[in-house]
Image (spheres, rainbow, N blue to C red):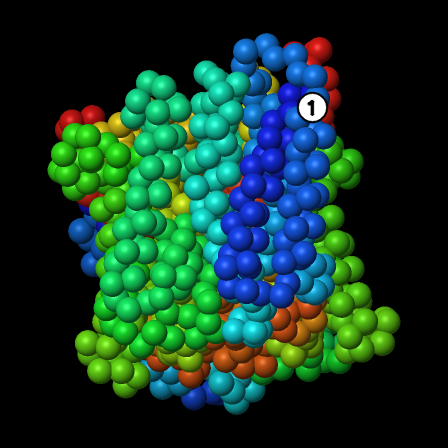
Amino acid sequence: MNVKLVMYILGKVCLAFGISLMLPFIAAFYFNEKQTVEFLLPIAISLLLGIFMSRMKVEYRGHLSLREGLALVGFSWLLVCFLGALPYLFFGFDFSSSLFESISGFTTTGATSINDLEAIPSSLILWRSLTQWFGGLGIILIFITLVPQVGSSGERLFTAELHGESTERIMPRIKTTVYAISIAYMTATFILTLILCVLNMTLFEAVNYAMTTISTGGFCMQKDGIAHFNSTAVEVVILLFMLFSGGNYVLYYKAYKEGFKKLWQDTELMAYIGVILFFTCAMAINLFYSNYYRLSESLYYSFFQSVSTITTTGYYLQNYNGWPEFSRFCILLMMFVGGCAGSTAGGIKVARLLIMFKLSWAELKRTLHPRMVIDIKLSGNHIAPNMVISISRFFFFYIAIFVFATLFLSLTDKLGMLDSIGIAASCLANIGPAFDIVAPFSSYADVSAGAKLISCLLMLLGRLEIFSLLIFLNPDFWRGTKNW
Amino acid sequence: MNYRLLSFFLGKLCNTCAVSFCLPLLLSIFLNEDCVYAFLQAIVTSICMGFVFVKFGNSEDAGITYREGVAIAGFGWFVITFLGSLPYAFAGILDPVSAFFESVSGFTTTGATAISQIEVLPRSLLLWRSLTHWIGGIGIIVVFIAFLPQVASGAVHMFNAEVTGPSSERVLPRIKTTAIALCKIYLFFTAVEMIMLCLAGMNVFEAIKHSFSTIATGGFSTYDTSVTHFESPLIEGIITVFMIIAGGNFALYYLIGEKGPRVLWQDTEFKVYISIIFIVTAAIGLNLYINNYFNGIDSFRYSIFQVVSIISTTGFVSNDFDIWPPFSKLCLVLLMFIGGCAGSTAGAIKVSRIVVLTKMAFAHLKRTIHPSMVVDISMSGKTVPSPIVAGIVRFFFLYIVLFAFLTFLIAMTGLSVMDSIGIIAATISSVGPALGVAGATCTYADINSFGKIVISIAMLLGRLELFTLLVLLRPEFWRSTRNW
């Protein structure tokens, strides 16, 4: 592994990070806040670190190897999460809460350990939302467009970053794709900001909510979240944009180029909509017959909650923790599903589940006809056997990590069984709120420091699709390559 | 499909069932109990059904293919569980659905009971309950293969449709010899345990029933309080040892007779099985001790009994684990998913599958770094062929998905999230006692009829390892074979 090259690029990440931290710094001046040094210090630290690391003499061979790509993704996330915790730390939060808040931001989880959101300065609120926005697109993804050196091997980064199973490239040059997706992402944020402004939000609120919605993050500015505005129009707009963000950006680009019928031909998108509608109906019927709301309200609230959970955003209108048990279980199930591949959503992803279902169904047929050749297609594309193996592996790791995390969480203070299950499922899928102790309208503030650190690890594992972090545990990753 | 052949075997099955009713009938005549007529009615019904089936059937047609094997095993289980429910229903103790539930729970060696007061039941009916365990444990098909001459050529298909475990590898060349050997080992262990329990102070009647339940990893007891009733460490110890034995691979025990005890330590699965028992016992024991539930010795005494009882999917209870700390309870839920060894009477995913899955996941992690590496997964020094690995992956996926789906269904009845999770985890793996409403000291009596049917399906799916029943859902299964 070319350690110097990795260091060099990480240095560039630090520089970019320092620059982006200037935004809340400027905002602090704009809002006339007293606390500005708190931002200045992290800026100085990251810029110095960046300058130091990018002065590394690099001997560049013209491409990144697989290891370097993986190391870069993993380390830049860790680095950014730690640097991102600095502003919170200087604002007086304890270490575990700061780290938790930062990781929850960059992984677009949206779980917050700050109990009194109204009391913290607006500049810090902006920083929280910004971390989600950056995290959503993937800092690396932005970064490839900025650092020309990565060149042709950007694809490796791309697969490690945008993960999912359909990293099918729509254009020959990866950089063009990245530009296109970044522009789509920014445009969507911009449009949402405009609409929210029109709907009587202040510009500052609109920007914050737009950033956390498009990144499927879910940080709120007030404790009661979206319900604070008490406006159906705002809720519906946010609902639609969540639905959009849970879809595949590559598909959107394709639809933009080749006509909108591409959207209806995509199996994953249809399954995604189908799953949302299925759970909406199940929960609405349950809520209505349990006499919680009127029929229209039941449908509306369950639709909002389904979309928010499947896209792994984590907004809420009602406290679903008080809903009947069946609805709560539906929400728990949805936490595992997640959005489409190629979106900013977490979870197992619809495409993976679809492929596994098709495979199992085909396997049943194969037991009848043992010499049959199984061929799985998704939206007309053949799924290569290698991909099937990697999906199976992912599924197993996902469940195994969920199980062990639940066990460890239940060892920490104050967490019951359902608390542990909920937190593990929610953090691993980058959602945020879960049940009981961390139900909607409450925060992770009451959770012990140990549980927060476990949640941090889960959020990172979930965001990097488990495997980009687990690979670091493999001794072969660190060994020299001479034997191979 | 050869329906006449299917009918012939189902008829034979009915007759076998009629014969097995004779044992409790004799006891009830001997003890002069009320339920004599219930057994007589049940015998008459089975003989009539058997007569009709055999009359329609024909054994001289072509041999048994895969389809017939699956159909015989699949429908055979439905027929025998239906017949087995008759005594409960005719005796007026349970309504038809609960009677079916009790019978399925017996034959699938689950041990979940719908009877709220066991002590008041006639002893002959209690014997029938334990007998269903014992018959279900060895497997009705295995009994068939051992004693019916007609099955000679197609035995392998029937055998594979019922006997559990990932591969159909056998110790003995002929299916029939294997089946007879299994029956002998099964009888031997039952007899040994019975004698030991008698010596430890149980009366003969209790000893017979408890040894039937233990060796079949069933879990029906003759008391509401299960093994807690005896308050005897000696009895707990004996039952623990035999539960461990019953959760191990019976084919391996046959090999001990041939090659000596060292085969145990050469078997990867058995080693992992024992290690899991020790690790989890230690974890739960410490957890109980640190939280001041029991003193040092008692913590480990209750912990090892419960761990063994659940990993072998027996479901005996020596202490109300429902009030244990969350970590201990979650550990037990995890064990419900692991289950015993392949080729045992235990249910659930099975240790060997878990081992193969883990090895596969890590091997493929390594392969990402070395893309041209050949992945070789071995168990007990032998390579596991890749189709079997693929099958195991599908099995794991289906198991988790069906678990989620059945929990979804059971949650509809209004049970709480944790209760639903616990109930399906405990019944699909044929353990028995779950958490909360169906916890260690409670029964399934209060669950409504819909819930009982869902649970019965879960138990049957778990016992036949999913595929045998799911294949019946494929349309191809019912179509004629001419295209193939």
Give amino acid for label 1: Arg
Instruction: Tell me how many marks there are.
Output: 1
Q: Which residue is mark 1?
A: A55
Foreground residue, A100 or B25?
A100
Chain holding disc 1: A
User: In the image, is residue A463 above or below residue A51?
Assistant: below
Q: Residue at x 50, y 80 (%)?
A: B437
Residue B389 screen position, x and y as percent: 50, 32
Which quarter of the image is occupied by the C terminus of chain B?
A: top left
Q: Residue at x 70, y 11 (%)?
A: A483
Q: Residue furthest right?
A: B296
Residue situated in front as seen by the camera: A12 or A290? A12
Q: Is residue B53 visible?
A: yes
Q: Which structural element holds mark 1?
A: loop
Q: Left or right? Give the position of A448 relative to A262.
A: right
Q: Quadrant of the N terminus of chain B?
A: top left
Q: Nearer the viewer, residue B59 or A338?
A: A338
Residue A346, percent from left and from top: 44, 49
For the point 76% across and 68% down, which residue is it? B287
Which percent across, then down, holds residue B290? 81, 71
Q: Is residue A233 left or right of residue A409?
A: left
Residue shown at the point (37%, 69%) measured from the top left: A226
Q: Is residue B15 left or right of residue A103?
A: left
**Label 1: how many residues lie within 10 Å, few (<14), some (14-19) or many (20+)?**
few
Q: Position of residue B250 (x, y in %)?
A: 61, 45
